[in-house]
Image (cartoon, coloured by chain):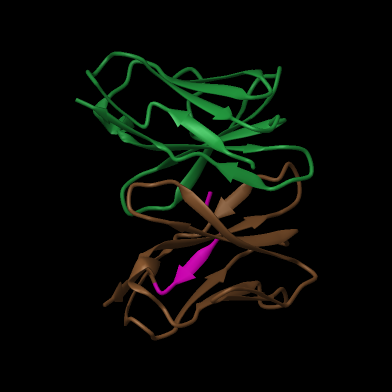
Amino acid sequence: SQQGEEDPQALSIQEGENATMNCSYKTSINNLQWYRQNSGRGLVHLILIRSNEREKHSGRLRVTLDTSKKSSSLLITASRAADTASYFCATDAGSGSRLTFGEGTQLTVNP
Amino acid sequence: GAVVSQHPSWVICKSGTSVKIECRSLDFQATTMFWYRQFPKQSLMLMATSNEGSKATYEQGVEKDKFLINHASLTLSTLTVTSAHPEDSSFYICSARRTGDTQYFGPGTRLTVL
């Protein structure tokens, strides 16, 4: 079952703008991960943030985690048309390392 | 490193036939492999978890007799969709994990059942 909810479901921005996507979850986690999926393709792992971390950066990506609110956000700065994709958060509760995916955000970056 | 492949990348079959999808970890030994299904514009739903040499653990609502999973080696898991029907048409994605590491995802297999 899906425990993650993401908002917005769809986001359309202009190239150069920042894109923020949010993810909420219900149970305690070991870590939270963000993935990108281009249409009809597999998943690309973007970043992993552990439960004892609050913020993490990777290039133009910034992820925050608030375990008290059970939420995370993914910020993509200076977006490019090539960033157009679906973005999913996935939580790892630690037992068996099964991942539970959120509903995803469809990001469209207009050139 | 940590590359996972799937074969075939797409398959079209007639209703009632069986289809086998392979998932391979190319440069590492995967103690656990996972199979997901994704319908258009939806998220990934975990179908089953398989550990090498043991029976797969299926998620609630997934028919184990319909979706046969074999994890015969540390680098190969197969998913067989038996007696496929149009409602089984979907995008099937596998992932592989080695002990203490994260999951690495395959590129997916598009199944279309006519």
Q: Residue at x 60, y 65 (%)?
A: A25
Residue A13 percent coordinates (x, y): 32, 81
* Magenta highlight range: A1-8
Query: At x 47% / y 31%, what residue is drawn?
Result: B6
Give percent across and percent down for residue B61.
49, 34
What colour is chain B?
Answer: green
Residue B34: percent from the left, percent from the top?
A: 58, 35
- Tell which residue pokes out farthest to the bottom in this image: A17
Above or below, comparing residue B53 to residue A13 in the picture:
above
Above-or-below relation of B77 to A20: above
Q: Residue at x 57, y 70 (%)?
A: A24
* Rendering quarter of residue A15: bottom left
State left or right for residue A16 relative to residue B34: left
Give the chain coloured brown: A
Work out which quarter of the rendered image holds the N terminus of chain B and state it.
Answer: top right
- Horizontal side of residue B23 vs A32, given as left or right: left
Residue at the extreme left of the image, as rendered: B114
Instruction: Point out the image quarter for the C terminus of chain B.
Output: top left
In the shown orientation, is residue B99 left or right of residue A21? right
Q: Height in image: B105 above or below A52?
A: above
State the image coordinates of residue B99 (x, y, percent, origin top left).
Answer: 78, 38
Residue A3 lies in the magenta-colored region: yes
- Is A67 magenta? The answer is no
Q: What's the magenta bit mostly, secondary-structure-wise?
A: loop
Q: Residue A109 lies in what quarter of the image?
A: bottom left
